Image: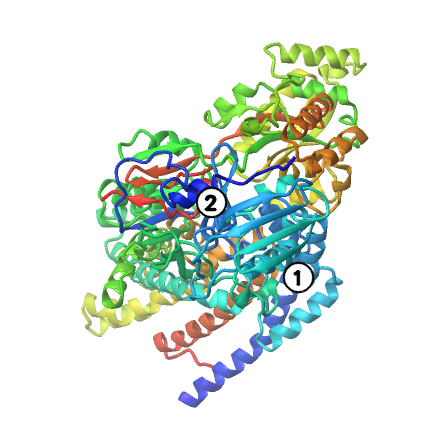
């Protein structure tokens, strides 16, 4: 059984390689279309530069070589897992991404767990009390949070909880005046995590709640539910042992798809709360035409999406043993 | 005649630290030691290599670690820094610096004239974006002893003494940066300098930490235990961090003007526009003078008349600015270089004047009262530029010029204006910096019409007369004669107006009133904060 699972995982990862190659080449090509280059931006930021300096920069970045040479070199490097060097940051791309991966995963995993967990709970609750006040309240809440722009929600939480009440810090990942260590640091980071995680959760929560509610309603009309009731199970047992497991599958699929979006898509929350995530890094590197870094982030995101989807597929089998991994 | 730029050295010798630094502008009471200063820096700097990038945010942090040979007072006169005195020879071609004694780098090695020679000749003159220009006349540096550095120039370069601050020309340790490739040096982001604070760590996307240098060469300084720079990408959050006192200072208009007006009413917050006198940004409208219709000086003059400077300052920039008169910022008044005796376009009946000029020049109004249509590019550095663009669009409509706005991102806009010259009219802002040779010449000299180089002569306007005035002013060592050359230069440029000079932009620093002694020179936040302290 375990061997079969491992073989399945291995084959899937192998199949992902050509996909990743296509992604790399496509991204590279698309980014070439953007006018202006990293030398323009660097010199622009400097506010002044001599012509000799610009030539120096372009040579250093390899921008003076033909595009196909740059592409070939890049793909060659990627094949050996060398993500290249960011001249703008003066650091290897891998190092830059790695530094941001921790905070990104922390935020992403927290938000996913909260959003999926609470979404399943609230969706199930709403379906149980279909068309009663509980259902209306939950639906109203879901629509409200979904319709609120993320940046606005974030700013309002800052105004309320940081500026007015003083319960949470406005931004950042840890207190920079104190520099806590050990457990105090972990508590401090958790303290800083609350507002950004809540902001993002509010947004995703609505989606999972609605999805779970619809899925529950659909599943509750199935024959197996009738059978379960007929064999004498009470409503609680029907819900926990049969309905919930089946109704969760679409939610799981959605979570898998969104995990990828969350990686780079938290730009707004990262901006508002100064959370040091990958999204903001990608955003900055686009506007500074730091192509090596941007391509590196795309590559890592693509890899993560492959891995997350694989994990979701394997979770399916756990929830529904009828699904075979092949 | 010997031009002695020597400072009051004798006096300094007798009273070492009593009168050496200029008195802090807003100092109150005796400095208290200790505390962590949290500054908001926007945006996050790409690197800490201030010796090869003059990008603003780099200067705000790197200057706490690296120092320069000179500092400056509010009259833009040089003051001792790592050099305790300097002498310029009669022909202006030899400058001798005597260095401070007992200065050590953060790794304990002494700072010597050899470090000066290495930094200026091997690093700044080769890899610094402005250094190539600043030190172009510098041929060699002699080091007769460890505390004397003699700069030998091919021609006089009076502007060079304005470019030796810790921001513009940071002094590096040769024993560290002398080995390896300077453009990719492993110590680029782990700076080792002589400054009051030592670099500790940089968590990208979050903060940089600098701790007090206990062996700093100025005894008893710095007062602060630590300086932390934080990076917050969102403007409203930056304001909130100052409001909740999580941060103490944010400069270079990191707090948006609209928030400044709200924060300045709070009891713990203060606001200043001083400390940018060596940046001197000017808000402009740049014409493409090589294509229709702005190849005609009369059309350019008409546009210059149509802009109500005060309206723009008050309504777009929330009052932070003063009307500009020409290519040189009025901050240079103290040096005598600045003049407002030029053609004045900022007149009450500007729109009528403009229409008359266009009528006289034969640009008749066609269908719908339109003389011609143009595209007006908007520089992508923030919302206010778009509003400014909308204002210009309205004003031009009154002249019968139908303008369409175009808004692009930074690299695209730079490429359009400075490489492809594919524009007609763009708004823009230019820092005129510490001396016209460094900040102003690049915009007007024919030699600096160089496609692919940003923030140089993108209007492609030049004239043999103004070229010659600039060339002569670069080597003129007599301040009076130099000022006269620049007065003539300003007159000619404003008359031809390849650029509409709109206003002198004020950067804003928002800070917590507990913070004292940070504003000690025109370098403002680019100073090293050795005198800054926090009230308990």
Q: Secondary structure at mark 1?
A: helix
Q: Tell me what residue is drawn at x 45 percent, y 61 percent.
A: B105
- Report which residue position mark 2 lands on: B526
Chain containing mark 1: A
> As displayed, is residue B502 above or below residue A97?
above
Q: Residues within 10 Å of mark 1 (few under 14, many from 20)?
A: some
Q: Tell me what residue is drawn at x 63 percent, y 40 percent.
A: B159
Is residue A218 something that shows in the picture?
no
> As displayed, is residue A287 above or below residue B434?
below
Q: Tell me what residue is drawn at x 53 percent, y 82 percent.
A: A11
> As displayed, is residue B336 above or below residue A78?
above
Q: Which mark is residue A113?
A: none
Chain containing mark 2: B
**Residue A125, image x, y percentages:** 25, 57
Q: Secondary structure at mark 2?
A: helix
Q: Nearer the viewer, residue B476 or A283?
A: B476
**Residue A85, image x, y percentages:** 58, 66
Q: Are marks 2 and 1 in contact (CB under 8 Å)?
A: no
Is residue B368 something that shows in the picture?
yes
Among the 4 quarters of the image, the one containing residue B511: top left
* Gap in angstroms between the C-alphas marked 2 and 1: 29 Å
In the image, B385: left or right of B212? Answer: right
Q: Nearer the viewer, residue B378 or B503?
A: B503
- Report which residue position mark 1 lands on: A61
Quadrant in which the C terminus of chain B appears: top left
**Residue B54, image x, y percentages:** 56, 49
Q: Nearer the viewer, mark 2 or mark 1?
A: 2
**Residue A74, image x, y percentages:** 65, 69
Quadrant in which the N terminus of chain B appears: top right
Q: How many marks?
A: 2
Among the 4 quarters of the image, the one containing residue B516: top left
Q: Nearer the viewer, residue B513 or A9?
A: B513
């Amino acid at each position: 059984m375990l061997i079969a699972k491992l073989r399945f995982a291995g084959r899937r990862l192998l199949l992902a390689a050509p996909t990743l190659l296509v992604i790399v080449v496509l991204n590279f090509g698309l980014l070439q279309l953007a006018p202006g280059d990293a030398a323009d931006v660097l010199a622009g930021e400097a506010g002044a530069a001599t012509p000799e300096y610009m030539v120096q920069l372009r040579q250093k970045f390899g921008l003076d070589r033909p595009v196909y040479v740059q592409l070939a070199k890049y793909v060659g490097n990627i094949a050996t897992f060398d993500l290249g060097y960011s001249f703008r940051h003066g650091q290897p791309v891998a190092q830059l991404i790695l530094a941001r991966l921790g905070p990104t995963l922390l935020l992403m995993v927290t938000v996913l767990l909260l959003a999926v967990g609470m979404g399943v709970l609230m969706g199930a609750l709403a379906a149980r009390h279909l068309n009663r006040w509980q259902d209306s309240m939950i639906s109203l809440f879901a629509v409200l949070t979904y319709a609120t722009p993320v940046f606005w929600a974030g700013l309002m939480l800052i105004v309320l909880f940081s500026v007015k009440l003083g319960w949470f810090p406005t931004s950042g990942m840890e207190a920079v005046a104190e520099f806590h260590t050990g457990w105090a640091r972990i508590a401090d980071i958790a303290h800083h995590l609350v507002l950004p995680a809540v902001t993002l959760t509010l947004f995703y929560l609505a989606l999972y709640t609605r999805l779970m509610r619809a899925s529950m309603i659909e599943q509750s009309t199935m024959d197996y539910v009738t059978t379960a009731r007929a064999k004498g199970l009470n409503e609680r047992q029907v819900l926990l042992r049969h309905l919930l497991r089946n109704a969760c599958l679409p939610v799981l699929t959605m979570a898998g798809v969104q995990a990828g979006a969350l990686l780079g898509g938290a730009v707004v929350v990262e901006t508002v709360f100064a959370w040091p995530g990958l999204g903001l890094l990608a955003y900055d590197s686009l506007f500074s035409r730091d192509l090596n870094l941007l391509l590196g982030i795309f590559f890592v995101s693509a890899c993560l999406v492959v891995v997350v989807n694989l994990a979701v597929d394997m979770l399916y089998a756990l929830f529904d043993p009828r699904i075979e991994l092949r | 005649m010997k031009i002695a730029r020597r400072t009051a050295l004798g006096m300094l010798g007798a009273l070492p630290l009593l009168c050496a630094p200029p008195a802090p502008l807003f100092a109150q009471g005796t400095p208290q030691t200790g505390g962590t200063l949290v500054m908001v820096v926007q945006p996050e700097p790409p690197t800490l290599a201030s010796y090869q990038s003059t990008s603003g945010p780099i200067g705000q942090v790197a200057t706490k670690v690296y120092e320069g040979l000179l500092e400056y007072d509010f009259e833009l006169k040089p003051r001792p820094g790592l050099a305790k005195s300097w002498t310029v020879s009669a022909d202006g071609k030899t400058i001798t610096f005597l260095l401070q004694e007992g200065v050590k780098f953060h790794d304990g090695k002494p700072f010597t004239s050899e470090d000066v020679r290495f930094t200026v000749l091997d690093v700044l003159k080769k890899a610094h974006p402005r250094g190539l220009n600043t030190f172009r006349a510098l041929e060699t540096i002699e080091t007769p002893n460890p505390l004397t550095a003699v700069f030998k120039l091919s021609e006089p370069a009076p502007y060079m003494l304005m470019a030796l601050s810790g921001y513009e020309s940071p002094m590096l340790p040769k024993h560290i940066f002398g080995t390896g490739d300077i453009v990719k040096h492993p110590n680029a982001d782990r700076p080792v300098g002589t400054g009051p604070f030592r670099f500790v760590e940089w968590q990208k996307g979050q903060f940089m930490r600098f701790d007090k240098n206990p062996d700093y060469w100025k005894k008893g300084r710095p007062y602060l235990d630590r300086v932390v720079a934080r990076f917050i990408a969102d403007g409203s959050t930056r304001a909130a961090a100052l409001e909740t006192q999580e941060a103490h200072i944010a400069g270079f208009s990191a707090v948006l003007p609209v928030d400044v007006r709200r924060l300045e009413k709070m009891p713990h917050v203060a606001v200043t526009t001083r400390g940018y006198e060596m940046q001197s940004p000017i808000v402009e409208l740049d014409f493409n003078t090589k294509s229709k219709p702005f190849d005609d000086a009369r059309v350019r003059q008409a546009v210059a008349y149509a802009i109500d400077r005060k309206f723009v300052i008050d309504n777009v920039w929330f009052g932070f600015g003063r009307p500009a008169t020409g290519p040189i910022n009025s901050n240079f008044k103290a040096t005598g270089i600045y003049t407002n005796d030029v053609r004045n376009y900022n007149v009450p009946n500007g729109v009528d004047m403009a229409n008359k000029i266009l009528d006289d020049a034969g640009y008749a109004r066609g269908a719908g009262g339109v003389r011609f249509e143009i595209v007006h590019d908007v520089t992508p550095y923030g919302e206010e530029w778009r509003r400014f663009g909308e204002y210009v669009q309205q004003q031009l409509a009154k002249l019968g010029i139908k303008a369409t706005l175009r808004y692009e991102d930074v690299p695209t806009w730079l490429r359009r204006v400075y490489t492809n010259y594919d524009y007609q009219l763009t708004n823009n802002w230019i820092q005129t910096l510490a001396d016209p040779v460094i900040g102003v010449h690049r915009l007007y000299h024919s030699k600096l019409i160089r496609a692919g180089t940003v923030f140089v002569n993108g209007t492609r306007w030049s004239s043999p007369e103004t070229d010659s005035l600039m060339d002569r002013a670069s080597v003129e060592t007599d301040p009076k004669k130099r000022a006269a050359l620049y007065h003539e230069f300003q007159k000619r440029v404003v008359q031809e107006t390849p650029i509409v000079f709109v206003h002198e932009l004020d950067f804003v620093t928002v800070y917590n009133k507990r913070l004292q002694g940070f504003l000690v020179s025109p370098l403002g936040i680019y100073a090293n904060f050795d005198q800054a302290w926090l009230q308990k």
